[in-house]
Image (spheres, helix red, strand yellow):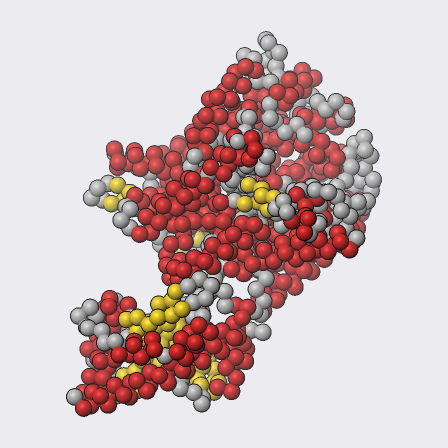
Amino acid sequence: MSAQSTSVIRGLTVRSILIGAILVIVAQAIGDMTWLYTSKTGTINAFWLPFIYIVLLNELIGRTNPRLRLTAQELVCIFPALALVNSIKYYPKGALSGGEALSGYIEKTIVSVGAGMNDPTTGEYWRMMTPPWMFPKDPTMIAAWQTGLTPGQQILWGEFLPPIIYWSLYTILMYYLALFLGFGVWGRRWVDVERLIFPLSIPMIYMIHNASDIDPETNKSRWFRLQEPTLRVFWVSFFIGLIASLIPVFGEVVPPLAVFGAFAWGEQPLLIFGLPSIMPGAMAKGVFQVDQVALWLLLPNNLLITAVLAYVVFGLLYQWIGVISGALPYNPGMEFLWNWEDIPANWFPFPYRHVGILGMMVGLGIITLITLRSRFVELARALRGRSENEYGLSTRSIAWFGLIVTIAILALFTASGVPFIIALAMVVFAYIYWTALARVTATLWWHVDDFANNGGVGTYIFPLGVALGYWPATVPTTGTTNFGLFATGILTIPFNNTWTLRVNGFGPGAAVTYYKIARETGTNVRDAIVAATTIIAIGVVFGYVWRIWLLNHAGGLANSNAWAWTAGMKFSNFIGGTSYVPVGATDWVPGLTYGLVGIIIIAVVWFLRSRFAWFFIDPTSLTMSMAVGLIWTWLSGLVALIIKVVLIRTIGVRRFESYVIPIAAGISLGFGAPILLAGLIEFFAVVLPRFSAQFVP
Amino acid sequence: MSELETIKLALGDKVSNIAWDLDGWVIQLKNSNLLNLKISRRLVGISFDWEWHFVTTLIMHEEVDEAGLHLYREMKRREVQIRRRGILRYSYEWVTGELLIKVFPELPPANDLLISLNRDENLQHLLRRSSIDELYINTYFELGGASLSDQALRKYYESPTMVGWLITAIKGPGSEWRFGPIVKRIYELLDYLAGKLLEFSRELESRLAFL
């Protein structure tokens, strides 16, 4: 057994395990309550404690008693408790997004099914089809899910036990598959060989590195030594970020500005009002994110230029020329819509968003997996005994972990009623799509669109079932009575990717980002994955139990922010209809055609980029831009590019190189820091009173 | 077209031979003031941006006698580098080398080479045209015999084995899609600079001989 563990340090200690376990329970308890009863559903919707406060608290405790100070590696091992509850947006700035975290998984599983059983039009169908392991059959429990318990009524925990076990297992297995792929397949190559940038990991790594650099003479962290130029730059940037956080604050509280929204603390849509009069039909919307701009200063120019160029070609020229030539219809206001709305990105003749989602993402995933083929060989060898120690983690352990998780998913899906071949296809597509998601996250950012909801299931998985005779080609609008299709429709989301998975705190991109953090902080990788798996197991089971208690005791679906509408999404897309793309498609042929086009595009771009130095178009950046309908990439890309060029030209490459990481980390962490204050105000002024007013003992 | 092919195309008939050496291509040149040019690239910080290093040596004496030693030490006092200003259009100024100030603080810099370079309009034109990010003119050295680079520099200063110049030009990120023209322009800059340095060094050597 060869060793690559010379400089890794143990982080899994009794106190880090205890703190992690307690923290995940407290965070999910407060976070899920906030999610259900907040009035700021876009910004304060999970546990509002950015990790910088944990680090600062650790410094305070360490100054009073050095033995109580957690090491950098221990901090890394407790980090999953808050990442799990708060989504991937927690990594760079401490932002919250409950719908894209553990609470989001709960919404799209047990909440969704329970909501379907209460639906006024399709409820009877749902009640007929839903097995008791997905939701209780007892009518009083179904009714309480909608409006809460009546005084004196009790939760029938015995009825809820099978759904708790079933959905916990489903959710845990999804998390574990992401951890296997992140730690076992992608991480090592992307960190050591390809040296991907992992922009989302930079603030956390920078913060932990510096906060844990303790001066033995003073027992103080060197993080606060302002006489050091790079640290001074960090703190100045931190305050710039703090000031910039006024953007989401204004977006939430000042009525004239609130129309722009302020999703996830800083995803600020900007509209170019004059553009439609000059270029009718051209996309006049972009999302500006302060932390995205800051961290994209670290990206190579060609990635940023690709993002901007994709917008110019498809968002501006294609849409404008299409409209004025009559090839695309003109709908007033189409210039300002979101990517998932009725825009040319989703229309014939060139639905570039679907080309991106069904083709380029799939192609990117396949190509990336091909480049990782030797890694699979290594893992297969490790299963037979030739194990390596990779920074504390044995390849044999991770290979067995991955094998067991994959088989367990197949077994769970098949036992749930999904035909085995379909279960296999779902797992294969998860491997492919999750790989593309993780690569995009490790290279650029978290934004890519949903596979399952945007034609992925209708184009690839549903036709396979038809071809194999598992279900008919037409799904009745009253709902399928084919249990194989029902089970597939229920389980495909979030497993085959919705936003809840792709931006989850331990989704594919986050899992490999966490691996990067563990590596860069010198944390024993085995400790990091053990900490994450333990915290996830505790958090998930507690999350389901807590949500059942909350909804039953405080108002039910009807009186909370719970996503009852996810039942309708599952019904119309999978079990009471099929989601075909692009807009207007009546079967899977157009989706397959555009998917193939996308796969060819990405293969050609990948080849040209790897063969010719002058070919600057980056395949990952192009895929992300297309697959997310451009809105989430071009504006931040353009601003970052301009700032980067100006900075390099004014201060020179060498100083830019020295200061860019402190600048990016400082702005990101400063931008997220006020979330604590906003969260405290919202929790005590709105969440607790709303919960208390509806509480039924 | 690969980077190597781009380099060959940019330098045209000046190329005598190209070989890979550790981290870059070493190009033997003909009909030029430069005998060789090493072109290598390295990552900037943690990002995937590349910066390109163009390094050439101008060896004047391959053996060092008393006069050569004296010449080398006088050349050392004349180490210079560029300072770049501007955002959209650069202007350049030659200043005393940082390495000289940092490693040899006891040596008083001599500014005759610096003044000469700053007065050269054609050189200024070539600098602007190549939009180079960094350019260093140091005396030739080899890093050996000491664990720290500063110590190695001092050691070589005490007993140099060759007398000459080492010119390093660095072009920062954003070079990829116009790499050919950049290579050509930087070559023209270095070729002209080498001519100037050879001329200056010979004149310095003859001045020293009369002292």
A272 sits left or right of A126 in the view: left
Q: Which quadrant of the figure contains the C terminus of chain A?
A: top right
Q: Is residue A138 left or right of residue A43?
A: right
A81 horizontally vs B83: left or right? right
Residue A28 rendering spot, x and y as whole percentages: 50, 29
B95 or B137, nearer to the observer: B95
Nearer to me, A98 or A246: A246
User: Would residue A169 be visible to someone looking at this image?
Assistant: no
The quarter in which the N terminus of chain A is drawn is bottom left
Residue A521 % position (x, y): 38, 48
- Depth order, front residue of A14/A397: A14
Where residue A67 sits in the image (x, y, percent)? 27, 36
Residue at x 71%, y 53% (from the top left corner): A320
**Residue A553: x and y, percent?**
57, 17
The correct choice, above or below, for A662 with respect to B89 in the image is above
Residue at x-position 59% and y-position 62%: A617
Number of marks drawn:
0
